[in-house]
Amino acid sequence: MGKSSTAARLPRSKGTDMATIYEAKDCVRKVKYLVLPERNRRIVQEFMTILGRREEFNEHGVPIPNKVVMYGPPGTGKTLTAFHVAASLGLPLIVVRLDALIHSHLGETGSNIRKIFDYASVVPCVLFLDEFDAVARTRESGDEVKEMARAVNTLLQCLDEFGDSSIFMAATNLETELDPAIWRRFDTRMTYQLPDEKDRRDYIRLLIGGFGCEEGAEAEACRLLGGCSFADIEQIVLKAKRKAIIERQPMDGSHIGLSYEEYAPAPVAAGARS
Ligand SMILES: Nc1ncnc2c1ncn2[C@@H]1O[C@H](COP(=O)(O)OP(=O)(O)OP(=O)(O)O)[C@@H](O)[C@H]1O
Ligand SMILES: [Mg+2]
């Protein structure tokens, strides 16, 4: 983790910092590969282009987008995209710690949300809130209704007042649980899915890289790992590499097959497969 070079102090709650700071150079290191489906790649690219040409947009009176929501199954690159955006913009990534943010005391969660947004208004950064549904649940839901409704209201205000010197990014696996009013505040929305065949092949190729492997191992990995997330694919290919190293052999299909069996990826929700 990088040390903050910024002057403002991170707000604290429950005796700890409310977020972890990753300096831009740490973000660059974190994102070795990011395989994005064409649509998301285009969205991210356009987003960067606009931020790089702020004046032109100001001249035309067209607001600059800076509120991004990402949703989709685990291990598909949402968090990685936040690192990528921070790295590309040369900004620190401020990863909010939900355990510190959410508080059982009345009004405390809302007050914490305000503090972290205040921080982001002073320090140009990419402010990232993972598991966003935990704070942005629809106000109709039954549990801890009052406190969370208050928190959602504060979040709405903070999003409305959010200046354009920083970027706000949020991620969730449970987009259907987000409050509709919150949903509307985002100018950029990206949906994530399990990799399709092309993205799976590209990713496996990147992961194998210069590691020696038998002909056909890559194709076998591609076939076997259909329906796995990027994160699962990464773990299985690493496991297969370890097996090959132990045996002092080039990696082959059997290393991949055995690693897949041992790793036993969690079943994915119907509809998330591609
Ligand atoms: N699109 C991708 N391209 C390259 N690597 C990926 C991609 N998605 C996931 N990975 C790999 O899996 C790891 C976990 O991904 P990430 O944390 O971005 O998933 P996520 O979508 O945020 O999941 P969650 O919903 O569980 O938070 C990454 O660090 C990376 O190694
Ligand atoms: Mg994540």
Image (cartoon, grey):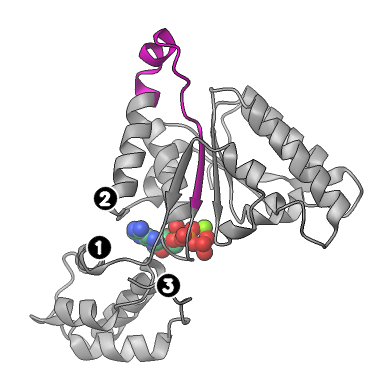
Tell me where the magenta segment starts and ends, as one range. 51-70
For marks 2 and 3, the one nearer the N-term is 2
Residue at the spot of label 1:
199
Residue at the spot of label 2:
38
Residue 126 in picture, x, y percent from top left: 52, 36
Is 220 on the left-hand or right-hand side of 94? left
- On screen, residue 173 above or below 80: below
Q: What element carries label 3?
A: loop
Residue at the spot of label 3:
271
Residue 9 in picture, x, y percent from top left: 70, 31
**Amino acid at dot 2:** Glu
For marks 2 and 1, the one nearer the N-term is 2
Q: Number of marks in the image?
A: 3
Residue 10 seen in the current view: no
Image-quadrant location for residue 192:
bottom left
Graded by Cα atoms within 10 Å as few (under 14), some (14 to 19) or many (20 or more), the crowding at tag 3 reads few
Q: What element carries label 1?
A: helix
